[in-house]
Structures are given as C-alpha cells and as structure tokens.
Image (cartoon, rainbow, N blue to C red):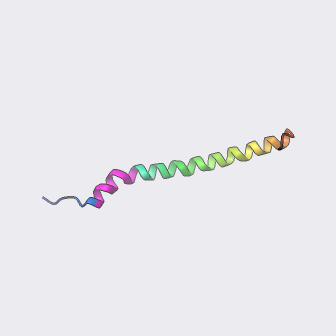
Amino acid sequence: MNEVPEWAVLVGNYGFPTLVAIYLLVRFERRIDGLTETIQKLKISNNLEE
C-alpha cells in the first residue's frame, strides 16, 4: 500500500483548524473595530473625551 506523504498529513491535521482560526479572527476584528468606533462616538456625544 502507498503511504500518505508527510505534508498531506500535516495539511490534514492543521489545515482546517488554521483556516477556521483565521476566519474567526477576521470576523471578530471587524466586529471589534465597529465596537471601538461606536464607543468613540458615545464618548464624543457624552462629552467624555479625554
């Protein structure tokens, strides 16, 4: 029988979790940026600017 190449095993073991982590980081980064912007707007509207 043919053995699976080592690189294929690495991609199988780490490829999917890596893609999921990158996807989640990108999504959460956008959400955090939006929350930061909203907080800044609230500070300005409440005259709590530093």
Reply above or below: 24 against 3: above
Residue 7 shown left or right of residue 37 in the figure: left
Residue at x 83% of width, y 43% of height: 49
Query: Percent x, y for residue 27?
Result: 57, 49
Residue 9 shown left or right of residue 21 in the figure: left
Main SS, magenta residues: helix
Residue 15 shown left or right of residue 1 in the figure: right
Quarter occupied by the N terminus = bottom left
Residue 24 shown left or right of residue 1 in the figure: right
Residue at x 64% of width, y 46% of height: 32
Q: Residue furthest front?
A: 50
Residue at x 47% of width, y 49% of height: 21
Query: Percent x, y for residue 9?
Result: 28, 55
Reply above or below: 49 against 19: above
Q: Residue furthest right?
A: 47
Query: Percent x, y for residue 10?
Result: 32, 56
Quarter occupied by the C terminus = top right
Magenta-span inclusion, residue 5: no
Q: Residue furthest left?
A: 1
> Image quarter for residue 8?
bottom left
Magenta-span inclusion, residue 11: yes
Magenta-drawn segment: 7-16
Q: How many marks?
A: 0
Query: Percent x, y for residue 44?
Result: 83, 44
